[in-house]
Every structure is written in C-alpha cells, then in structure tokens.
Image: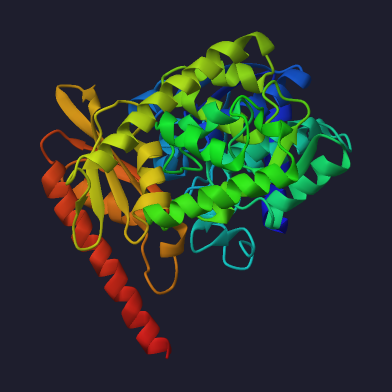
Amino acid sequence: MATLQKSVETAARIIARHDYARVISHYDADGITSAGILCTALLRQGIQFHITIVNKLEDSFVQGLDDDLILICDMGTAQSDVLAEHLKERAVVVIDHHAPSASVPVLSTPSSVLINPCCLNAADARDLVNERGSTICAAGLSYLVARRLSGEKTGNIDLAGLAIAGTMGDKLDLSSGVNKLIVDEALREGIISIKTGLKFGDGQLQERMLSSTDPFTPLAGKPEWVAALLNQVKIEGTREVTDLTEDEEARLTEALLALVRESQHTGITEGTLVGTTYRLQCEVIPNAYDLMRVIDACGRLGKSGLGIGLCLRVARLREEATMLYANIQTKLVSELNRLEREEGTVKGLTNLYYFYVQEGGVTGTLAGIVAEYLCTDKPVIGFNKKDRVEEGRQVETKISGRCHKELLTDSTGINLATAMESAAKEVGGFGGGHPVAAGASIPDGKEEQFITILDALIGKQKKEEVRVETART
C-alpha cells in the first residue's frame, strides 16, 4: 500500500505543476468515471483540460499527442513501450489496473508515473491484487489521485460516488481493501448512504423487471410473465422499486427465486438479486447501479460525452442519457431472448461457449450476462461482425470474452486476458484485458481459426493448473 501511495503522491505533484492536461480514457463505465473524477479535480485546481474517450490506445494516436501533460486512464500499461518512445519529453500519468504484458516493459521515464497495482511486487501488491487481477479499478485509483491533488482533509471526497459506480462497472468487490476505505469515508462524510435491497435500480417495478439484464431473470422481455408474478405476490407493477417495504421485497425475491429454480438458470441466486445498494447524494443519477449502467451505455453507443457530462453533474443531460440506456437494454433483451429461443445459437466447444451477436454495441455486456447467469461452467466468447471497423483496408471483427468469477480459482487456472491475447496474435490481431473479462480484434474471416486456438489455449491453462495442484499435494 505504501508504494501505491507514493505513486499517487507523485502523480498529484506532476499534475499540480501544469495548467493544462490532455485526458485520455477508455469508453466503459470505469474509464468514463475515471476521466470524470480527474477532470472535476482538475477544474477545482484551475487546470484546463481536453478529454478524449477511446476504444483502444492506438500507436498512431499516441504518436500524435503533443501536450505537455497527458493523463491516461483505464489503459496504457500494455502500451508502455510506445508511450516511453514517443512521449519521453512529456509528463505522462498512467492510471490503470490491467495486467502488463510480459513482452512490454513497464513505463519508466523521469517525468512519468504508472499507477497500477498489477505492476507492484508481491509484497507491495498484497490486498491490491488477487487471482482475478487488481482489486481496485481505474476509477478508484483516480479517486485517490483526486483526493491527494486537493491537499485538503476532505477535498474531492464528494467524488467517491463516481469511484463506486466505476468499481461496480468492473464488478469488483466494494466490501474489502481500498474500495472499502473509499466507501467508509464517503459514508462518514454523508456522501453516500447504503441499504440492502433489490438491485434492479430506481423506477417502476414492472418496467425494471421487464428490462433488467443485470441482475438477469427469466422475466426479461416477457410482460405476461411479469404481470403474472406481480399478481401472485400482490404488488402493483406501477409501484416504484424504492417504495417497496421489506416484506414486499422479501415476497418478490422468494417468488423470483422459485421461478429461477424452475428455469434451471444456475447463475441466478439470491445474492445476484439482492445486495447492498448505494445512494449517491451528489450525483445527477443517485442510484449507483443506474449511474454505472447509464454511463456504460453512453460509452458503448458512442456517446461518451454524455457520460462525461453526467460525471460532471450536468443535470440536463440525464434524460438523453437515460434514453440511450433504455435503447441498449432493448437490444440486450432482444439478444438474450434470441439466444434462449433459437437452439444452437450458443455453440459449445470443449473449454468454452461462443456466439455471434446480431445487435451492435452490446457484445461485451451480452457475453458477461451469458457467462454470469446462463452458461456458468465455461468461458463465453461473443463475436461482433456488426460493428466491424476498418483498419486501413483490413476489416476487423470485435470479440469479447467473459467468464464466471467462480472459474477463476486455483483448480481451473483460466486467464482470458493471456489466452485471448495469444489467440488473437496468432491470427494477426491483438487482444488483452483481465482474467475474467478480455477483448480482441481480429481480421475478418479468422473467427473460426481464432476460436479453435482459444479453446486449445484455455484447455492448456486448465491442464497446467491441474499439474501444479498435483505437485503441491
């Protein structure tokens, strides 16, 4: 922890020496909240900024940067060699939590600092890194930098809500480690409040049950099922989720779990439906689950500016951003119903499942839902040929991989980040990410070759871990 604090202090000192910053971040909920936290902190210090939200950090993009101070969030570790080569005369702060590639040296220049728990030695990384990767995301790390930049005892503590939303976006645990420290100090200062309840978010109950995909239930996209269940528990569908009594929530939860048992969706448990909910007193969308989901939708639909605006608390943007989220939920529910309805749509290999999406902008989210709730025993890979991008003359297919957190144990040894990076490289593409969630881009037409290689690599990871376990015993 001491080494992390030192890096945070160094970052704050570097930032404070400048009056302008270029902020570059990833387009998901963690990346956008990270940028929102930093930019709010910069504003309060009188430092002007320009934000750019990207899908990936291209070498050509890095080469074109000429700002004196460059802040990179939720990415950058894997591009340390490119940053060191082209930005050696610039002040660079990288705030990331992705594991470094073995082939890329960690960023190290006199005027730069890399804040990444995954790059610390074993002693310094204790409680900051586990088998799933870093326990703190870029938003949490950005919050630490913002707190330090202020210099005041409670300065920028009101940004804790954004750190919590970003942490939720990456599905990290808020009840332990540095994340718990962030939650605890926000509670003490009245920045947030917490309670135990349904994770559907705010809004009318029937609408939330129809459109909810995380938590997922068999009711998604089935209005007649929703009406029947609400009639069974004698709760009006037009009631607000936040207005339900404890008894009503308990009755509804039990009815949902009974329905789940009939459907045999093993990934849906009481813990996925009910848990700690966070009320963010300073944000324009006060329910943390809702804020995370809306910001993530903005990024995935190419409207990152809206997401940044929400982080900067521009209330007039709330309606437009919420409509975008409703749009992406419609796509997700449609895709989930298709996967459920059309036999053979989700194909199974020895070590993984895979499918092709028909709706753009939802691949990673959809793969995550399938892995978390429906196909929990093996990693899930989603291919997206709808949002294919032109790289020069070459058309690329986007790929998202997810696996249930229970697969990341000593008995399986699965690491999607390294497996997808290797498989993509073999077919002329690139990839990486986290052990539990990774992505790749490959040349069009290489999909079947990629999935065959990936299946073999995951099988090899599992066998290697079994050999290690045998040796230990």
Q: Give coordinates of residue 205: x percent, y percent.
A: 59, 30
Q: Quadrant of the N terminus?
A: bottom right
Query: Residue 340's x, y, as percent?
Result: 28, 42
Q: At x 37% / y 81%, what residue is drawn?
A: 468
Name the residue: 35% across, 75% down.
465
Q: Identify which residue, 2 or 146, lies in the foreground.
A: 146
Check the image and report above or below for 239 versus 461. Answer: above
| Residue 207 image offset from top left, x and y in percent | 53, 26
Instruction: Work out whether residue 431 or residue 95 is closer to the camera in this orientation and state it.
Output: 431
Q: How many numbered marks does the figure carry?
A: 0
Image coordinates of residue 318 in percent, x first then y, are 61, 15
In the image shown, does 208 or 404 lie closer to the viewer? 208
Q: Is residue 420 left or right of residue 313?
A: left
Q: Is residue 241 visible?
A: yes
**Left or right of 358 in this view: 272:** right
The quadrant in which residue 342 appears is top left
- Which color scheme did the rendering employ for the protein? rainbow
Q: Is residue 103 visible?
A: no
Q: Residue at x 55, y 36 (%)?
A: 231
- Quarter of the picture holding the C terminus: bottom left
Q: Residue furthest top?
A: 316
Left or right: where does residue 129 sit relative to residue 327?
Answer: right
Q: Nearer the viewer, residue 328 or 432?
A: 328
